[in-house]
Image: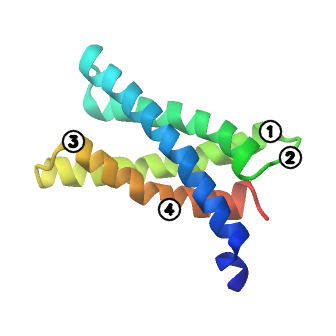
Amino acid sequence: MSEYLSWDFLWKFIKFGVVGFTGLFVDFGITFICKEWLKIPKYVANAIGFAVAASTNYLLNRIWTFQSHNPQIAMEYTQFFAISLIGLAINTLILWILVSKYSKHFYLSKLFAIGVVTIWNFLANYFITFQP
């Protein structure tokens, strides 16, 4: 268990968080454009924003966070994206509960959902996609 509390593990989580923070701007930006300008329904706009951010996050995490040299990029990307899709389901469920059931603000709810999904995505990608 101590290997998962090592400096390397924590440093990867910090880097993953930095990448995720840049993804936050991609996600929010694409979601905003789709929802507000293109008038796409909010949950569909959320899915589009999330998918674009997941793809850019994969590239940055592959190169910087995990420094992967896995030649099977398609498989690695597929695993990363599948984990992101599970994250999307978690994200959407949290949004639906907070917005529809508790009438919370959409973008504040989205921010909370992203925080929860970040933990899921990091752990799943650490142990599955970019295995140490």
Task: State which quarter of the image contains the N terminus.
Answer: bottom right
Residue 73 relative to residue 78: left or right: right
Residue 106 relative to residue 119: left or right: left
The residue sitting at 74% across, 53% down in the picture is 66
Q: Earlier in the sequence, mark 4 or mark 3?
A: 3
Percent coordinates x, y for residue 45 in the rendering: 34, 28
Q: Is residue 17 above or below residue 43?
A: below
Percent coordinates x, y for residue 126 in the rendering: 68, 61
CB-based contact (under 8 Å), mark 4 and mark 1: no
Q: Earlier in the sequence, mark 3 or mark 2?
A: 2
Residue 26 is marked as none
CB-based contact (under 8 Å), mark 1 and mark 2: yes
Residue 106 is marked as 3
Q: CA distance from mark 1 to mark 3?
A: 35 Å
* Residue that badge 4 annotates: 119
Q: How many neighbours does mark 4 have within 10 angstroms: few (below 14), some (14-19), or many (20 or more)?
A: some
Q: CA distance from mark 2 to mark 4?
A: 23 Å
Which residue type does callout 4 highlight?
Ile
Q: Earlier in the sequence, mark 2 or mark 4?
A: 2
* In the foreground, 106 or 13: 13
Which of discs 1 and 3 lies nearer the camera? The answer is 3
Q: Secondary structure at mark 3?
A: helix
Which residue type does callout 3 highlight?
Phe
* In the foreground, 112 or 97: 112
